[in-house]
Image (cartoon, grey):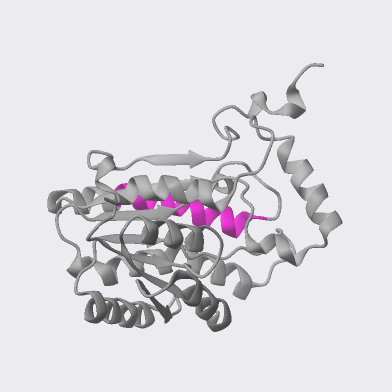
Amino acid sequence: MGKLDGKVALITGGNSGIGLASAKLFVIEGAKVIITGRNLTTLTSAAEELGSDVLAIQADAADPASMENAVSAAIATFGSLDVVFANAGIAAPTPVGGTELSVFEEVLKVNVTGVFFTVQAALPHLKEGASVILTGSTRATDGAPERSAYAASKGAISSMARVLVSELSPRGIRVNTLVPGATHTPIWKQSTPDEIAKLEAAHARTIPLSRMGFPEEVAKVALFLASDDSSYVQGAEIAVDGGASASPLGAPIYRQG
């Protein structure tokens, strides 16, 4: 038996990176999965890869009406909804003194407003025992330069999750936050191999486990939060970052010898 047998899961941003890795694992573990994304090309490719237990819907997480339509399609196809993995998000440099308002607002619209309205769209269909998973980031607390909007958006996710726990606990719905650190995702493909190697080496020096993570490693934690294995885990923030946030001084850059 799979850990998600009989469950239906919605994964926003399920067409690449952590979302796609989670969709693959959820299907293996017995779930019916709905993935959403804005990029029709990658969405179609992901759907072909994932097979018949997956419904792919082109949707914009920042558009409440779009997410309501996606949820309606999911219910029409699979009849229920047990897991919401509000994973869709974007990143953009927003250096102080050199950032356009539209860029800053778009990050917040997708990463904060979009997450809230994704949960709101799904809520009428969630019953006791359902699991809501939000995607945070270590960028919320590490002070990385030129990431004000992204850091603020992910800090907001942590704060929002606490409120959702308060509101949804009486209904028996769990809300937890997954907090990835530096992870190999398709965004790296925008760089040359040499640039990627340099970035990976730089990140590795700041991580106690001396390497970046892989989407599959984050997906396994998402699986735990989605499954009944975490039935008494509520309001948790689980970092999947090789120890970078828990023990920054344990990173290789600070080691002697």
Q: Does the stretch in magenta take in 179? A: no
Is any part of residue 137 visible from this angle?
A: yes
Task: Decide if residue 133 is on the left or right side of residue 208.
Answer: left
As displayed, is residue 236 above or below residue 153? Answer: above
- Image location (x, y in percent) of residue 202: 77, 42
Depth check: give the residue in front, 134 or 220: 220
Residue shown at the point (60%, 67%) measured from the top left: 104
What is the magenta segment's predominant secondary structure?
A: helix
Residue at image position (23%, 76%) is 75
- Seen from the viewer's position, the closer of residues 14 and 48 is 48
Residue sitting at x 57%, y 35%:
245
At 50% from the left and 63% from the top, the residue drawn is 20
Image quadrant occupied by the C terminus: top right
What is the x, y in percent for residue 102?
Answer: 60, 75
x and y percentages locating residue 211 in the rendered image: 68, 39
Q: Is residue 74 above or below residue 130?
A: below
Q: Is residue 251 above or below residue 15?
A: above
Start and end of the magenta stretch? Answer: 147-163
Location of residue 243 (image quadrant)? top right
Estimate the x, y position of residue 128 in percent, counting from the top left: 14, 54
Q: Name the one closer to the observer, 125 or 211.
A: 211
The reply, left or right, for residue 106 in relation to residue 222 is right
Question: Which residue, as the protein is rendered here, is positioned at the far right?
Answer: 194
